[in-house]
Image: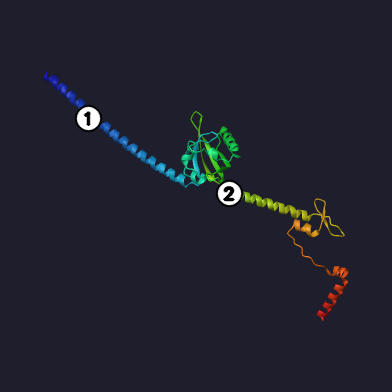
Amino acid sequence: MASEKDAMGKALQKMLTSLREAEEEVMKYRQSLEKQVQERTRELEENRHMLRTLLGNLQGMAYRCRNDPSWTMEFVSEGVIALTGYHPEDLIGNQTLSYGDLIHPDDRDAVYEAVQDSLSQRDPFILHYRIRTKDNEEKWVWEKSCGIWSEDGTLVALEGFITDITALKRLQQEREQLIEELQKALSEVKILSGLLPICSSCKKIRNDQGYWEKLENYFRKHSDILFTHGICPECMKKLYPDVYEKMQREKALSDT
């Protein structure tokens, strides 16, 4: 009996030892996992902070949205404030309004159709269109985005970036206006370089509408020429002979 009790005691002692060793191994493994989790969490926080800093320095807004007519936002960076006047929480989930509400009514259909056309080809897309800010200011924006697809080919979301190009658009419009004005000026110069029907008697010019008008009026309309009136010696002698002779005598006296 004593030997059986000793054997059982030894077996129990060995089992307890094994349990303690297993418990210590589990504790070490748990501590290792906790350390890995802490390190991974710290890395994620650092990456998240780096991403927030990067997005915060961008002159525009990064986003993730659904492919619906409202462009329901799932994520919006802080750049949306400077761009639209709204905060991220106003647009995420269409809490206050949707991003689609900000797009100019005249541009909404064109934007939606352009995006769907690019997605059908699985191509990224670049768009130019107008938005209305919280202060009712009209801005031109440039957007570059692409679709995010699951492994089974399902469209999950759209991700992209939108920035303000209003100043650039105004410069482009001013350039186009300047070109138009130059072309108009050039066409007027070409008119003056052609043949002008002029009356051999009264010297009136026939304009493009077929009406006769004074020479000075015609040139004033088609150029920057301003006329000042006088009378030449030949006309003075013909029309005012007395005045002409007097002027000639005065000139002769002054010459002597």
Q: What residue type is disc 2 on?
A: Leu
Determine the residue located farthest toward the bottom in the rendered image.
256
Q: Does 47 appear above or below 154?
A: below
Q: Does 190 appear above or below 19?
A: below
Q: Which residue is mark 2?
A: 168
Determine the residue located farthest toward the top in the rendered image.
1
Residue 13, by quadrant, is: top left
Badge 2 crowding class, 10 Å Cα cut-off, few under 14, some 14 to 19, many 20 or more, is few
Badge 1 crowding class, 10 Å Cα cut-off, few under 14, some 14 to 19, many 20 or more, is few
Drawn side of residue 145 relative to residue 216, left or right: left
Q: Secondary structure at mark 1?
A: helix
Q: How is the image coloured?
A: rainbow
Q: Position of residue 129 (x, y in %)?
A: 58, 42
Q: Which residue is mark 1?
A: 20
**From where the camera sits, is residue 1 visible?**
yes
For the residue pair 36 and 128, the one nearer the viewer reads as 128
Q: What residue type is disc 1 on?
A: Arg
The tally of labels here is 2
Drawn side of residue 48 relative to residue 128, left or right: left
For the residue pair 210 and 40, the one nearer the viewer reads as 210
Q: Position of residue 196 (x, y in %)?
A: 82, 55
Residue at the spot x=23%, y=30% of the render?
21
**Mark 1 or 2: the one toward you:** 2
Drawn side of residue 91 relative to residue 223, left or right: left
**From where the camera sits, is residue 76 visible?**
no
Q: Does 14 appear above or below 255?
A: above
